[in-house]
Structures are given as structure tokens and as C-alpha cells.
Image (spheres, grey):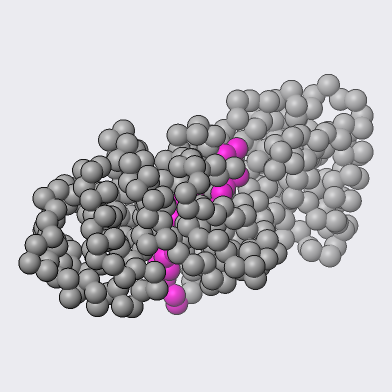
Amino acid sequence: MNVDIEFYSEEPLENVITCLNYNIDRVIFIGFQDMMTESSKESVEEVLEEVAGIVDIRYLTVSRNDLDDIICKMDKAVHNEIQMGNSCYLDITGGEELVLVAAGIIAERYKCPMHRININSNILHEFNMFNSSDTIRTKRKENCHLNIEQFIKLHQGSINYRAQKDYKICINSTESSVNIKRIWKVFKKFQSKWNGYANIIKYKTNTNSLKVVLLHSEIQSIMSKCKNINSILEFMEFLKAIQKIKVISNLHNLNKRITFEFNSDFFKEIMCDPGSILEMYTYITAHESGKYDDCSIGVHLDWDMLNKGQEEKGVLNEIDLLLIKDNLPLFISCKCGAVDHNALYELETVAKKFGGKYADKLIVSSLELGERTYARAQAMGINVVEIIQHHSNNMYII
């Protein structure tokens, strides 16, 4: 039996990374009581069973500042396993200073191989000081990659699928992909005015009807509140452009009113949600690139598990896009308009809560960020992609 003995880390990914890469039958976690909470252990156990098939998981609680206690309990655990004829591997991926000292002492005492895994590169570093032929490297298995749902579960959260918008659920169909790419080309042409035009359409769109009737006076009233749209004729050019790609039909401008009809609920939802086209096109770009193990759009993250035992329940946060590759997540916020510091803090908060220190963060913006906002994003470790008008229709995320 292969036994992984490791320190229980506050970073959930560090607690499962060895088991995702190597054939392990039993895991013994050594950790501090305040870290090994019941909800945290439950999440780790569920993911290890589901992804790696490991159900034999044990815990040893040690004193945070007592090296002798750590050595004593680690010694007993290793001794018992060796007595049963099992192979022990000391995993120091998430170890703190005292635990690392204890692991070195136990490794020398029992001639056990030690290792750590660089999670960002997924490279194994072995410390086989005794030239043992039985090292963790020999237990390599085909990588188990976490999907997004499993990754969020590992971080004590869940995905609320009921909150996802209907028109985003069907995004992976070929027809939807083709239509979004067509709308994206129109978006590029009218990028600076897109939000304003979408808000005009949304103003008179009925939930239960595909038909839209806009009076000139209503359009002018909305335009008066916007900085960069002021011409009904230019608005008509926009409507003609989306009619040409069959988003709408029966477009007329008569008797000081504009009428048209959406060709589907899918198109209506996109055109009435100003930021959706940027979000959906970014998703398609990532999904079709083949770079990622899993991609999700409009992800509503439920904080229930994080709030167990507290009064506040059911806290939801939406992240526009969530991608994962080699167990590393990328949290993306798409902004079809100005990006302020609040947008950065919202992205930082969600990524930290559900991705930990290994999460990458990206802002995709239809406008250039101000110097102060851009500097703040860099300071927070948030990458930025600015979709500049009239440039190529392609987008390269990474």
C-alpha cells in the first residue's frame, strides 16, 4: 500500500496535488486543529474520493509550536505503516517550517523519500537522500485533472446552476458560436456606442414579445443621458447592421418611430444585456482554443459551505468566466465599459476565496483602462486585456 504523509495546508490544492498525480492508497494528514475544520476536511475527502478514488484518509492533530509533538506523532504514523509493510512517502508541498524540520528528521530515521510538487509548473522535486529505488516518481499515474465544479468544491463552495441565464447554457452549440462571432464583428464596428444602443433597445423590449417599438422621442430622451450617442440616423445604421446578420428583421423607421422584431429569444437576451457579447465571445475564444480542461460562463458561486455555522447564508457571487488548466484556475471579469477599482476588488475577492494563491485573474475590457486603474490592477496581480476598436476581430487571452 502506498501511503502519502503530508502536512494539512490552508491552500486546498496543496492537500490533493500528490494524489492527483500519483497512485496513493492512503493519506495521513498532519496538521493544526484550527486548519483542519470539519467543512474543510469534508471538501478534501469528497474531491479525493471523486477524482482519485481515495477513501482512506486519516488526520493527526499536532501542536503548532511543539516540534517534539510533531516528530512524535509523525514517527508513530510512519512506524505503524512500515510495520504493516506499506511504502511511505513524505509530502512537504504545503509544509510550514517546524513540519519541514520534523519531516527531515523522520525521513532520515526511516530512510523515507520526501518530495514536493511545484503546483504552478506541476514539476516534482524529490529529496531521496538514501538512494531508495521506491520513490513517489515510480508511482506516477495519468494525471487526474479537476474540473471547475470539483475545484470549487475543494474550496468549500458550490456552483448554483439554477442562477445561470438560459441563453448562456446553449453557448456550446455550433449555431450559437457562429451567431456570436457574427455579432462580435458588429460589436467591433460600433464598440464605443454599443452600451448606449443596447440600453435603448432594452428600454422598450417586452419580456413576453420579440417585437420592439421605439418612438423617436424615447430614443432622444435616452441619448440625452449618454455621452457618445446623439443621432437616430446612426442608431438606424446600427440596427441595419444587426438586421444584416439576421439578429432582427422587419426593421422600419416610419412616422417618427422605429419598429423591428428579434428573430429569437437568444438574440433578444444578448442585445438587451450590453456586456454579454464580450463575455460570450471571450468564452468561445477560450473554449475553441483547446487550451483548457474546462470552461464555464456566467458562474454563480454559492458561499453556503463557507458560511456554515454563521448567520449569513446563500451568498452568491457571479464570475463572468472561469477556466481551468492543469488544476490551475483563471477567473475572468468582462467589462463592456469603464473599469473602476470596485471591479478589481470584486474579482480579487472571488478569486482569492475560491482559487487561493494559485488563481490567475484577468480583466477583459472593451475600453482602455485609466493609468491609475491599470496600475492598481498590476499591483493586485490582475492581468488586463483591452479590446481596442477597429483592431483585429480575434482575441488572444493568453
Whether residue 346 is visible: no
Residue 182 appears in which quarter of the rendering?
top left
Residue under the point 28% across and 55% down: 238
Q: Is residue 371 above or below residue 97?
A: below
The N terminus, quarter of image? top right
In the image, 232 versus 141, the foreground residue is: 232
Q: Is residue 376 left or right of residue 363?
A: right
Q: Is residue 314 magenta?
A: yes
Q: Residue furthest left?
A: 255
Q: Main structural element of the magenta stretch: helix, strand or loop?
A: strand
Residue 19 appears in which quarter of the rendering?
top right
Task: Find residue 145 and report its horizontal and vertical position in percent.
Answer: 55, 36
Q: Is residue 308 above or below residue 332?
A: below
Q: Is residue 339 magenta?
A: no
The C terminus, quarter of image? top right
Residue under the point 60% across and 68% down: 370
Residue under the point 31% across and 33% down: 174
Q: How many marks?
A: 0
In the image, 338 versus 217, the foreground residue is: 217
Q: Is residue 398 left or right of residue 321?
A: right
Whether residue 253 is visible: yes
Q: Is residue 70 above or below residue 78?
A: below
Please give the range of residues in magenta.
311-331
Residue under the point 89% across and 44% down: 104
Task: Find residue 112 and report its horizontal and vertical position in percent.
Answer: 84, 34
Task: Find residue 158 and report its horizontal and vertical position in percent.
Answer: 44, 55
Task: Find residue 47 and report its horizontal and vertical position in percent.
Answer: 53, 44
Residue 336 appears in which quarter of the rendering?
bottom left
In the image, 317 versus 253, the foreground residue is: 253
